[in-house]
Structure formats: C-alpha cells, structure tokens
Amino acid sequence: MKECFALVAQMHPAYNFRGGTANLIKTMCSYPSHPFCSVVSADHTGPNPVPGPWDSIPTLSLFRPRSLFPNLRLGLGLLDNIAFRLQKNRVARFLKKQGVKRQLALITNNTRFALLVDNLPPSIPRDLYIIDDPVADSSLYRMNEEKAQQTMDRLVRESDRIFAISPVYASDLETRYGRPCEFLPIPVSDALLESARQDSSQEKSSPDGAITIHHSGQIHHLYADAIANIISFLKKIAEKKKIKINLELWGNINGKDLEKSLGIALQQEEASNFKIKLCGEVSPVELSKEQKRADFLLLVNSFLPKMEKQIRCSFSSKSCEYMVSGVPIIVYGPSYSGPAVYLDKHKAAHVITTTDFEEALRQIEQVICDPGRKTIVETAKKLALNRHSSEAFFKRLAF
C-alpha cells in the first residue's frame, strides 16, 4: 500500500493564478497516481476557482485575516502568523482524520508560510520541497532575517528528506547543513509531454523572414538587467548581419513598467530590422503554440551580485516548458543559475554565462547565425521526457 501524503502548500490547487508555484501545485495534483490523500493550503481558493482533478482531494484551507481585509497592508502579516498558530490543532485533527502518514511541504519565498510549516504537528514525518528561499525575501513579509534563518534551519534539521528545485541550491544546502539534499526537477504537464512525443511542428510566425526570439512570462528583478543586455545584443546583431530580428515578450507585461525596470525606452532601441513586441498574456495552450513558432526561446537570469542568492535557489518553470517545444533554447545568465548549470550539463541549450559584454555578444551572434539546432533540440526533449514527467517526479518522492 502506498504511503498517504499531505501536500502542504501556500496556494490552494484551485487558485486562479498563472505562475510557477501555482502551476507546479496544479501539475502535482493532476497526475492520476499522485500520493496525496489531502491538501493543506495557507489560503482559500480565491475568486473564480479553477476546476480540476484536485476537486476530489480533501482540502483544508486555513483562515487568514488578510482575506477579510485585502486592501489593508500594515500588520496583516503578523495577524496571519497569529491565525496560523491558533489553527495548529485544527490542522492536526484534519491530518489524523485523513490518515496522513507523511507531509510534503512546498517552501516558497513566503517567510510566514515557512513559519506555518515549522509549526505543523511534529508527530507526522515531513519532507521539504524547497522551490524558493524564504530568508532572502524575509523583509517583504516584515520578518527579521535572523528569525527567518532560524526557521529555515529548524525546517531543514527536523525534516526527513530535503528536495530542492535547483541543482545549485541543492548543493548549497548540502554544504551548509552537512546532510543530503536532492535536486528534484519540476514536472511538466502530461499534455505538454504528449505534444513533445507527437513531435508536431509549427510554421514560423514571421512571414517577412525575421528571426523570432521568444520570451515567456513576467520580467521582474531577477531578469531585468539580462533582458536589457539581450535587447542591446540583438539590435547590434541585426545591424551587423543585415538580418531581421523580432524579440517577442509574452505575458502580462505593462510597457511603462517594463521600461522602468529595464532602464531603457523600448522604441529608442528598435531599428528598421529589429523590433520588440509586447504580445500580451494568452492561455497555456496558445502560449505553447507560440513557443513552437519561434526560432529561439530565451531564458535569462540577472547578473547583479545582489541577486545571487535568489538566482542560486530558483529554477524557472518555463525552462521545462521550453525543453519540450522542439525549439532551441538560449540561456543567458550567471554560471551559478540553476537552468544554466542543468541545461549546460546535459547539452540541452545554448548556454552563455560570461559577464563580458563583447564576448556574450559574440556567442549569441554565433548561436543565431549558426545554431546547430537539431542535436540540442532532441537532447532537450529526451531530458524532459525522461526526467520531467510526473511519473519520474513521484518516483523520486517514493520510498
């Protein structure tokens, strides 16, 4: 008989939000043979909940004062923390009723959620899947960094098994705590994997013959400086080689906010043979189609020293989506970023990690003009099929 797990997550599986953590929770709860007999979420479903296989899983959503006063900011983090502590017995009764034998807690950058996990019943063995660092962002949740680090130390010390979303962070945790920490790759949805198996090709999206570079998702502080460099690289390459290049940025991106984040005016960076297109947010199915129409998929991370800790522990979920697309991936980021280390190790992407601007320009120009695409694309697909299926994911969790 398989062991009965409780998934302890910050978000409810039905929460209507597109993002790395939300997508991961949905993927984990969609696999037919998942081991979760119950879910404990730190929040309710929110408005317009998304229906799915998780509807049949018994779920306990904890009460948060924040849900009653969504527009109030001051003091709500502390009130949430108090509310979580008062619900410890409620959680214990729920887990006992469901016959839970083991907890799998997803640790995010939310420091107060990490504290909640730390306060769950110690009688039930616990595994951690760390998908972000709760210490680095402790100030966002109005918690002292020292206290956040103490919480993290207890979680790692008192949990049975530790998994990390990034191979770099897994190694860092092993070094810090002197105990095994396993890199557990993000699972890709069964629908995307099936599409990769069918190997369906898409027509390229630029009728004028332009080379299309595609980036999916938000552009925040972990990406901004690298995206600004990429824009400069592509403009120079288009001018030098007399070729047309389109940089497509897909996602819920506001132009003015993006310019502020990048520190540049987008229109001033464009030229007759280089265009930057803000393409908006589309459904996951449509986004997958757009990825397949591109000539290259772009994956970046910040080179700024102040971002290093967050970069070391992160691994963008779009990395895995890109791997099944059949389109070559360009990774531009520091040598300590998880995707750079992982994809370079398996020769599944064109990886550029140099901090020298001119050398990075040279390498990206070489990739665009002479990509050697077929081997890299097939390697990336095989890697996704072998290591990023839900089946492979849950095999690693099993005893």
Image (cartoon, rainbow, N blue to C red):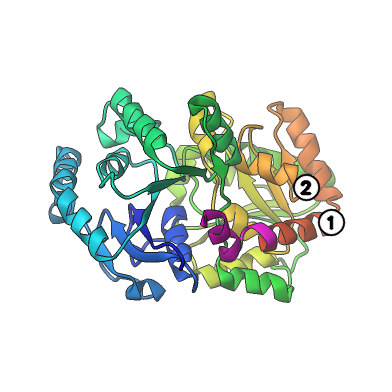
Q: Does the image show residue 113? A: yes
Task: Return the x and y of residue 200 as percentages of the image width and height.
Answer: 72, 75
Report the residue at 32% width, 50% height from top. Answer: 124
Classify 10 Å Cα crowding around label 2: few (below 14), some (14-19), many (20 and above). Answer: some
Report the residue at 57% width, 62% height from top. Answer: 188
Please tell me the numbered disc located at residue 347.
2
* Nearer to me, 313 or 35: 35
Q: Which residues are magenta?
A: 386-399
Report the residue at 83% width, 51% height from top. Answer: 371
Q: CA distance from mark 2 to mark 1?
A: 9 Å
Q: Are marks 2 and 1 in contact (CB under 8 Å)?
A: yes
Location of residue 37 by image quarter: bottom left
* Nearer to me, 86 or 374: 86
Q: Secondary structure at mark 2?
A: loop
- The stretch drawn in magenta includes residue 31: no
Number of on-image labels: 2
* Nearer to me, 107 or 267: 107
Residue hosting label 1:
375
